[in-house]
Image (cartoon, grey):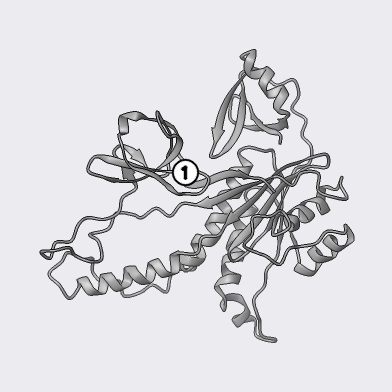
């Protein structure tokens, strides 16, 4: 695994080896830091060279899981398997149901909005493609990436019906929006699904049918093949280690819980802060070590494991936690 490097102005430079990064840190030439789960170093001096190799990101979109690969001609710097955002559609439906029910009670509510047709992206589609864009922005801040290669996805179309084909599917609308945003980060190239398969077969690689497994050949094999087709350099993967990225579902502040308790009282529900910490923040507890912040109750906070999301405790004292960084997803390495 290579270590991302940035200069004093946070501009990404070419990655370095862990051994060289340790020497820089020991000599105070660089300062270590974490960028949402990835260990990086920041140079405190002017770099000896600002020459860059061609670095591309291969993207394999998916409905449940997705693959990302950061690669140059000589090295595969990073493989990421990310879970897709899948809960927005049900959450919006529940929100609408609760809002309609409040209008039948003596409860504060916002007035009905009569026209929603001006929205180009539905909430679920927007969340899915914004999640992909967030990961691309995250990678762009760590590596000097200049090209993004995406496996193009298409929905069913009608012949001789251009008006239907332009906006009939949220998939097509979201994809086109994503492509326009990616062009602001670098060059965009696309590959068709059959082209990816041909590239994979030509290298003698196979893809697993277990799409939900945490294996390199589930999704990252396609993202690696796509990136390698642009930068070249390898006939088989030189690095199959992966980082698993799982988005956190943060419940925004709501008026109250859905079901009232004894006495007809409805408690407050939801927030993005817990006793001064942003939810999702990574902290170091004096007993449990590194964990991320969950909810709060009775002036105590809950801590969760970064690797699995499992709750460690629900009565941690805020003063026992040392803030490390803020993130909206869980990122941890996976032994392939």
Relative horizontal placement of residue 19, taking residue 199 as reference (left or right): left
User: How far from the left and from the top, in percent, is residue 317?
Assistant: 30, 34
Quarter of the N terminus within the rendering: top right
Residue drawn where x is 58% and y is 43% of the image: 332
Relative horizontal placement of residue 322, taking residue 263 as reference (left or right): right
Count of marks, rendered view: 1
Would you say residue 325 is visible in this rendering? no
User: How far from the left and from the top, in percent, is residue 102?
Assistant: 20, 70
Q: Taking 24 as reference, is 129 above or below it?
A: below
User: How far from the left and from the top, in percent, is residue 241?
Assistant: 70, 45
> Hey, which quadrant is residue 277 in on the image?
top left
Question: How many other residues sit within 10 Å of disc 1, few (<14), some (14-19) or many (≥20)?
Answer: some
> Hey, which quadrant is residue 9 in on the image?
top right
Residue drawn where x is 64% and y is 59% of the image: 213
Would you say residue 296 is visible in this rendering? yes
Q: Residue furthest top?
A: 27
Q: Determine which residue is flagged by label 1.
A: 305
Q: Nearer the viewer, residue 334 or 162?
A: 334
Q: Taking 167 as reference, is 31 above or below it?
A: above
Q: Nearer the viewer, residue 35 or 9?
A: 35
Please tell me whether mark 1 sits on a helix, a strand or a loop: loop
User: How far from the left and from the top, in percent, is residue 291?
Assistant: 45, 39
Q: Nearer the viewer, residue 7 or 319?
A: 319
Residue drawn where x is 81% and y is 48% of the image: 237
């Amino acid at each position: 695994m290579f270590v991302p490097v940035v200069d004093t102005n946070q501009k990404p430079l070419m990655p370095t080896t862990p051994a060289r990064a340790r020497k820089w840190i020991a000599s105070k030439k660089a300062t270590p830091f974490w960028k949402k789960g990835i260990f990086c170093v920041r140079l405190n001096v002017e770099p000896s060279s600002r020459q860059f190799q061609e670095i591309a990101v291969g993207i394999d979109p998916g409905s449940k899981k997705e693959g990302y690969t950061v690669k140059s001609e000589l090295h595969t710097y990073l493989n990421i398997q990310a879970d897709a955002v899948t809960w927005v559609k049900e959450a919006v439906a529940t929100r609408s149901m609760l809002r309609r029910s409040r209008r039948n009670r003596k409860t504060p509510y916002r007035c009905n909005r009569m026209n929603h047709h001006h929205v180009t992206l539905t909430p679920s589609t927007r969340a899915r493609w914004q999640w992909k864009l967030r990961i691309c922005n995250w990678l762009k801040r760590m590596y000097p990436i200049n090209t993004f290669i995406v496996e193009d996805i298409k929905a069913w179309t009608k012949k001789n019906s251009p008006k239907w084909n332009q906006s009939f599917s949220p998939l097509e609308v979201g994809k086109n929006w994503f492509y326009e945003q990616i062009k602001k980060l670098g060059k965009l190239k696309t590959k068709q699904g059959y082209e990816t398969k041909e590239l994979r077969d030509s290298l003698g690689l196979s893809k697993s049918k277990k799409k939900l497994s945490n294996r390199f050949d589930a999704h990252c094999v396609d993202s690696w093949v796509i990136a390698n087709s642009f930068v070249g350099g390898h006939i088989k993967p030189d690095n199959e280690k992966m980082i698993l990225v799982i988005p956190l579902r943060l419940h925004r502040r709501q008026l109250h819980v859905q079901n009232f308790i004894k006495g007809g009282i409805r408690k407050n529900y939801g927030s993005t802060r817990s006793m001064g910490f942003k939810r999702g923040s990574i902290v170091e507890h004096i007993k449990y070590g590194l964990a991320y912040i969950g909810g709060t109750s009775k002036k105590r906070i809950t801590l969760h494991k970064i690797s699995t999301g499992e709750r460690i405790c629900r009565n941690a004292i805020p003063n026992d936690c040392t803030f490390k960084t803020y993130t909206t997803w869980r990122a941890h390495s996976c032994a392939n």
